[in-house]
Amino acid sequence: MRFNPKARLDTSRMGDAGRSSGGRGGGGGIPIPGGAAGGGIGTLIIVAIVVVAGIWLGGGSEGDQAADTGRYAQCDSGADANGSTDCARTAIENSLGDYWSDTLPTQSGTAFQPERKIETFTGAISTGCGSATAAVGPFYCPTDQTIYLDTTFFDEVLERQLGGPDGGFVEAYVLAHEYGHHIQNLLGTMGKVKTQQGAKSDAVRLELQADCYAGMWAKAASTTQDADGNTLIEGLTDEDIQQAVDAATAVGDDRIQQSSGGDVDPESWTHGSAKSRVQWFRTGYSDGTLEACDTFARGAL
Ligand SMILES: [Zn+2]
């Protein structure tokens, strides 16, 4: 993935809370019954569902008080994004906003509102959905409309624990998936989630739809323009898309259960199998419509 060096970046929705003195696991426990003992992305998955279901039990208050470290202050242009992971994250956020600000009203008639923030952190963080630690992995909190991301997730969980890919488009896929949850929030889709576990549960449908939305953006990313009419992302390659597919595979429920040494148990799934996740990413990529991404439709799964 390459960024247009001349494109301007907007850092207004990028935040970084820095390292929490609370530290990993200290005081930030997430009270979830049946949480995966292995932590990592297993916990992430459950957290996402608890958030979606609106039954979060944590004590976080809406809006975080954390001071911002200024991590993204130097991200001015696409050239910066080509040389820095932080600025690349900013560029991806900008591209997602550009894409959905056009696509959402056009395809659904629903007004677009950007997410409040993408907030990176290390260690632990207090959110509108309760406290979270690094072990949780990336998630979207509908209450404060913020995507939370401990950036060590990519090395420590995805790569080392799950054997996922390493590379430029992996984080783009993850951010696009989380952004998909924001779009679902705007569309009111989260209210459809009644069943929380199982291969054809509403929770799985919600997650597969977020993968499909990620595919929609990926297809359009290299033609999406910013407010100045500049294309932000250039040169998305087949390898980039393959990385997204590999990442989607690595976070399939069956793969996670296998990597943590457990049995594959579809009854407990919350995000869908590796095969389904890839399939829905590809559906969004090839069809490019919200309609094609209707995972809640009868017979869709
Ligand atoms: Zn998700």
Image: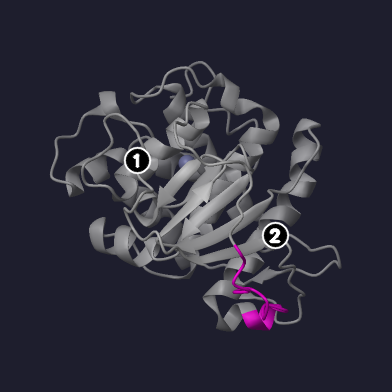
- Res. 13 mark: 2
Q: Quarter of the image holding residue 160? A: bottom left
Nearer to the camera, 113 or 167: 113
| Quarter of the image that includes the N terminus | bottom right
Q: Residue at x 73, y 48 (%)?
A: 114
Residue 105 image position (x, y, % from top left)? 80, 38
- For badge 1, the amino acid type reads Lys
Q: Earlier in the sequence, mark 1 or mark 2?
A: 2
Image: magenta residue range: 67-80
Q: Is residue 249 magenta?
A: no
Tell me the residue at 81%/31% (across/down): 109
Q: Residue drawn 19% across and 49% down? A: 259
Q: Which of 189 and 108 is in front in this view?
A: 189
Coordinates of residue 55 in the picture (x, y in percent): 48, 26
Q: Is 87 above or below relative to 215?
A: below
Q: Position of 104 compared to 45: left or right?
A: right
Relative to 54, say whether 223 is above or below.
below
> Where does the image place residue 76, in percent across and percent down from the top left?
72, 79
Residue for badge 1: 275
